[in-house]
Image: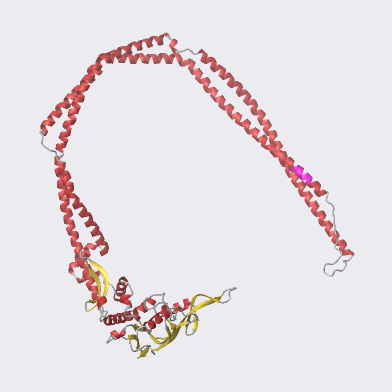
Amino acid sequence: MKNVKLKAMNLENFKGVKNFALVTNGESVRIFGDNATGKTTLFDAFLWLLFDKDSQNKKDFDIKALDSTGEEIHNLNHTVEANFLIDSAEVTMKKVYTEDWVQKRGASGKEFSGHKTKYYIDEVPKKKKEYVDFVAGIVEEELFKLITSPTYFNEQIKWQDRRKLLIEICGDISDDEVFASDNQLKGLELILKGRSLEDHRKVVAERRKIINKDLEMIPVRIDEVNKSFPKGSIDVDAVRNELAEIETEIDANKTLINNIQNGQALQSKELELKKVENDLETVKRSFETDSKEKLYQLQTKLQEEQGNLKILDMKVAEQNRTTEFANRNIQRIEEDLVKLRDEWKQINSQQFEHVAECVCPTCEQDLPADQVEAARQKALESFNTTKSTSLSEIDSKGKAIAERKKQYLADIDTSTAELEKINGIRSDKTKQIEKLMVEIQSLKSSLKDVSESPEYNKFMNLRQALEQEIALIKNQSEQATQDIKDANTQLETKKREINAKIAEYANIENLKARIQEYEDQEETLTKEYQKLEHQVFLTEEFIRRKVELLTEKINSKFKLARFKLFDNQINGGLQEVCETTYNGVPYSSLNNAMRINVGLDIIETLSNHFGIVAPIFVDNAEAVTKLNAIDAQIISLVVSEQDKTLRVEE
């Protein structure tokens, strides 16, 4: 168990307290003072020293001293220093809040630029992060506030966080513990099949919603089916017999129409016409076969030769492109050779010039003649070498370019020879194409039309006579056929009307079966809904039982404080809450004395659980005749009208 005690704390210019030294020597003390004498300021200073916040958990609060007009007093250091005993080790912590004044360039005086805070541990200056990390190593901020203020747990943290903290301290109740506590809940364990209670409640709620919606719609659907029943009644058997008679009559009329359209005279003439048309086709094919076959052969040959000519034209174009490309490159080579010749002449015409350095640049004495001559000879050799190398490089370039020109000239000669060969073949192809075209034209002019054949004209006249005879036979039977078709149209209309009546009444049994299906579905859904209702009841009983067990477990950890963790809702469900009570009275309704003692009870449990005891500041301690006895240093802040300055009493 870590034990943190406050041995002493000094304030300087902190929230209106100019100087005050609190000496406790690690023991519990009572601090007396009238209102506005600085009692709460001591707790604010204590928390600011550690966490940069006051006793109301606010980070932004006024630290600086004010004058009589309420204006800030400048150029003061605002200091809080405290000496702690942490187990058996002493440590001194100090923070100094100061104004920062800077001298800007060109300004006559210093200007206020803000505030800065200095940090010390055992008088050693520290960076803010080092200081914060040191405090965190003693105790985490939120936990420290929980175990140093009796009101912090109930008044300054959200109920959800209070509830979470209680469960963390006391441990939650497992589902298995709840099932084991009540035999009635064994059935729920089987229903869940490994699914969480909350997930199962969601599934049940969704299914109940769907069933309710389906149950609401079933009466509507039954009503719609009832409206579909036909009005009145008919003799269905008699109507079916009437329908059979109509269908027989329609079939008889169709047979009659077929007989008229397929009469013997008409069939005979149509067969004769078909034979004549076959004879015409035979004469036509025989007349045209020989001459046209030769024409087709010549036309095919012409197309083949024209294709070959196009291929030769492409080869001519390709050779022309090769020659043109070579000529362009030869022209560029000629231009490059001219440039190289000019460059060779320019370099070859250069003469050696040498300005001798006859004086030593270091000592400014005349150089010996042999050194001057040696320098001249070296410069001449360098000049000749450079000139020779440059001329040699130009010669090499010229030879390489001339070699490329030679290759391009060879390409031109090759293309010229190939072009002459291709043009010879092309000339032959052109003559052959012209000859084929003449033959085709001559053959076309000699062809005769089949209409000039006497045999063909004989069959044409016979076909025309047969077509006229067939048309006459059809015209005579058309009127009779149309009359029968009109009669069938009327019979089909009557047939549709009868079928509609039969279908309307034949659907009655289907409608009755549909209603029965809806009624069966309603019964099934009702039973399922009742089953789901029972599951809802079991889940609520499970939650209530878990609430009881959890509440008992948590309350057993405290001497005075009790906790209400769930609230009953109007719909019978439970809502999570976290409200501290004492003897059934909510914390918000307790008097100040009982709130403090309940808070001390909570601090004791928290300290035992987290393994740390720290100084407890009890504000408004005058309201408590007897503080709840706990093993911790308690600093009681007591309102005392006669004490116009703070007074410390052990």
Front residue of 350/393: it is 350
Using the rendered image of the protein, determine whether residue 614 is visible from the camera's viewpoint. Answer: no
Please check the rendered image and state whether residue 308 is part of the magenta-colored stretch, yes or no.
Answer: no
When asked about the image quadrant of residue 546, the answer is bottom left
Please provide percent x and percent y for residue 604. Answer: 31, 82
Q: Position of residue 249 (x, y in %)?
A: 17, 24
Name, please, the residue furthest toward the right: 369
Which one is in front, 322 or 122? 122
Q: Is residue 338 magenta?
A: yes
Percent position of residue 185, x then y: 19, 67
Q: Position of residue 69 (x, y in %)?
A: 43, 79
Residue located farthest toward the front when viewing the structure as drawn = 69
Q: Main secondary structure of the magenta part?
A: helix
Stretch in magenta? 336-342
Q: Quick one: quadrant of the C terminus?
A: bottom left
Number of numbered discs overlaid on the protein picture: 0
Viewer-closest of 548 and 48: 48
Write down the quadrant of residue 568 in the picture.
Answer: bottom left
Q: Looking at the rendering, in which quadrant would you find the N terminus? A: bottom left
